[in-house]
Image (tube, helix red, strand yellow):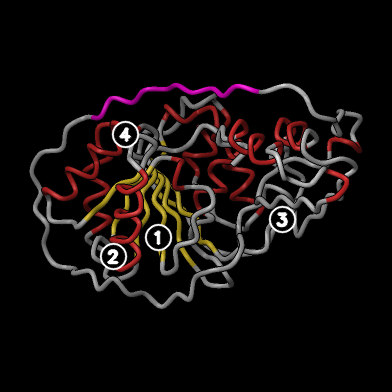
Amino acid sequence: MLDMGFEPQIRRIVEQEGMPHGDDRQTMMFSATFPANIQRLAGDFMRDYIFLTVGRVGAASENVTQTVEYVDQRDKLDQLMKFLMTIQEGLILIFVETKRNCDYVEDVLCEQGFPAASIHGDKSQREREDALRSFKTGRCPVLVGTDVAARGLDIPNVTQVINYDLPTSIDDYVHRIGRTGRAGNTGAALSFVNEKNSGVVRDLMELLEENGQEVPHWLRQMGSYGGRGGGSRGGGGGRGGRRGGSNYGSRDIRQQGGGGGGGGGGSRGGGGGGGYGGGGYGGGGYGGGGYGGGGGYGGGGNFGGNSAW
């Protein structure tokens, strides 16, 4: 919640009248990632806190099979439709970058016969609850969302996450794919990648390698040449062991001479931005492959054993 820009609301709760003083209460924070800027912010709420991790901070769950596919920007909807027609059961969560594109993708999916709902920051609380209820019950087995759906939601039976638009931050990627493969269950994550995503490609490669996932040749080329890499469509996936030594996520900055603990004061502002122009989708019907809403997942629980802080 801190990372999503809700710091003013959290600060009001913590500082409201009747809330025990910091020395008289127990404060705990949990996340799969703990970047340095959020650690500094956490220092406003906690003094001399204990930093506990399970695994490496910022690591993806080993229960999620990660696949990346090169898809040109104008071909994304076509590829999405083709992929959805191969899914027979379970809940599918699709992430896009902007609220406008979120509504657009939902509309196209519904027009093509895929029962879908959407969730983003411009939706009212009631609209969000209705969309989540339809998704959880399987009435709308496809949910299109922005990063507002990437944090804090625990939805059982999500078997597939699709990064229609790859995030610009590897931490956001970890949170997104953490919506599946929860509580010891397995899941799958598919990401559409092209030259527009060159800024996060190297971090993505490291994450895939650390989790023993296959890194396609075209992705290595893109990482080596600043995103001006392969143009042919390909894929890669698989599950395996882990490798260490990456530079994403974050360690305890107090042990790195990077500051940390703090007391009170100050408010912080959020950032935003980034537009995405949709691209049209023409043709293509929906044939075969019904949705049963079900899936064999028991859901619940924390991120697949990643970290706590």
Q: Tell me the residue that label 3 is attached to.
A: 307
Label 2 close to label 1 by CB (< 8 Å):
yes
On the picture, is 309 further left or further right than 9?
right
User: Residue at the spot x=78%, y=55% of the render?
Assistant: 53
Amino acid carrying label 1: it is: Gln
Instruction: Please give the residue where the numbered disc 4 appears in the rendered image.
Output: 72
Q: Is residue 271 left or right of residue 138?
A: right
Look at 58% across and 39% down and name the residue there.
Answer: 170
> Which region shows up in magenta?
268-278
Residue type at mark 4?
Asp
Marks 4/1 in contact by CB < 8 Å: the verdict is no
Residue 69 at x, y percent in the picture: 40, 46
Could you tell me which secondary element the residue under label 4 belongs to?
Answer: loop
Residue at coordinates 41% horizontally, 65% vertically from top-left? 159
Above-or-below relation of 150 to 61:
above
Foreground label between 4 and 1: 1
Structural distance between the alpha carbons of marks 2 and 1? 9 Å
